[in-house]
Image (tube, grey):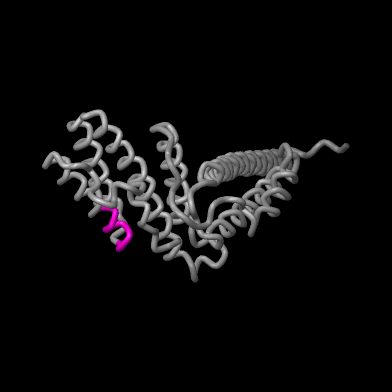
Amino acid sequence: MPIPSNWQMPAVVLGLLLGLLVSASLVRHYQEYKAYQRARLRALVEQSGRLEQALGQLARIPLSQPLRSALRDYLARQYAAIAKVHKAYPDIQKLIDASRLRIGNDGGATNGHVPAIADRGEYTRMLTAMDQVIDMLFTRGTRLREAATHLAGWKREVLERRAEINARFYIVQAHRAHARGDKREVFSLLRTLLEQLQQRGPDTEFVRSLYQEADAMYSREAKGQPLLKGEEAKVHPHSSNRSSAA
């Protein structure tokens, strides 16, 4: 290999430096790309995991069939996105196949009322799961298929169901406190429920009926009367109420 002449040396050195700079730039961009891919994978896995868990927790909570199908479809597409980022992600094809099979056949309740809630732990899990669905609808709702047609109704539906979960839990707990003769606890529970219904809404006929029921119970407790009156005492609290989205 011929040795460069003195006047060629600067050009050779400059060429080497440029080559090193280009190589370093390529390495940096590749590292940034891989970091982006890792961050995206973590986000996809976290989002899909939370939604999967939420849907499982809300299996007993009535949510309309179109909403359940849209959520399952979105979940299937999340798993497909994971596969694109990391083809060797453990059991990803099984997750994709299983989620696609559940589109249109979620298996969860689609009508009726919020069922009995065993304790505060179950109530907290239900509310956390419902808040996960609410967050998804309000922050990523437009990514759901058919969202333009149904999104407003779905938002109202989940907010009403959240209000019903609150009413279901706090009213039953108020009855138990009343049976124990713990007036302070009755007032505390009903005040909490009234605040939740007023602050979180939504302002619909269904939620207003829940508020009126809780307010009437509060007034009866203050007067030393039974929480429910007459024939109402023969049925479960707010059993005649029905979500407008059901």
Residue 200, above or below 123 = below
Q: Residue at 31% of width from left, 57% of height from top?
A: 207
Give the residue furthest to the right: 1
- Image quarter of residue 120: top left
Residue 194 point in image, percent of width and height: 23, 47
Image quadrant containing the N terminus: top right
Give the extent of the magenta segment.
204-211
Q: Residue at 60% of width from left, 41% of height from top?
A: 45
Task: Decide which of 235, 155 is in the foreground and name it.
Answer: 235
Residue 171, above or below 185 = below
Give the residue furthest to the bottom: 149
Residue 130, above or below 244 = above
Give the residue furthest to the left: 223
Residue 18 in view: no
Image quadrant containing the C terminus: bottom left
Residue 112 point in image, percent of width and height: 47, 55
Task: Decide which of 131, 48 is in the foreground and name it.
Answer: 131
Q: Residue at 57% of width from left, 50% of height from top?
A: 108
Q: Residue at 30% of width from left, 51% of height from top?
A: 200
Q: Is residue 95 left or right of residue 72?
A: right
Across the whole image, how many numbered discs are drawn on residues? 0
- Image quarter of residue 88: top right
Task: Decide which of 57, 53 is in the foreground and name it.
Answer: 57
Q: Assess whether residue 139 is covered by the magenta stretch.
A: no
Q: Assess whether residue 208 is covered by the magenta stretch.
A: yes
Residue 10 point in image, percent of width and height: 68, 40
Q: Main secondary structure of the magenta part?
A: helix
Residue 4 in view: yes
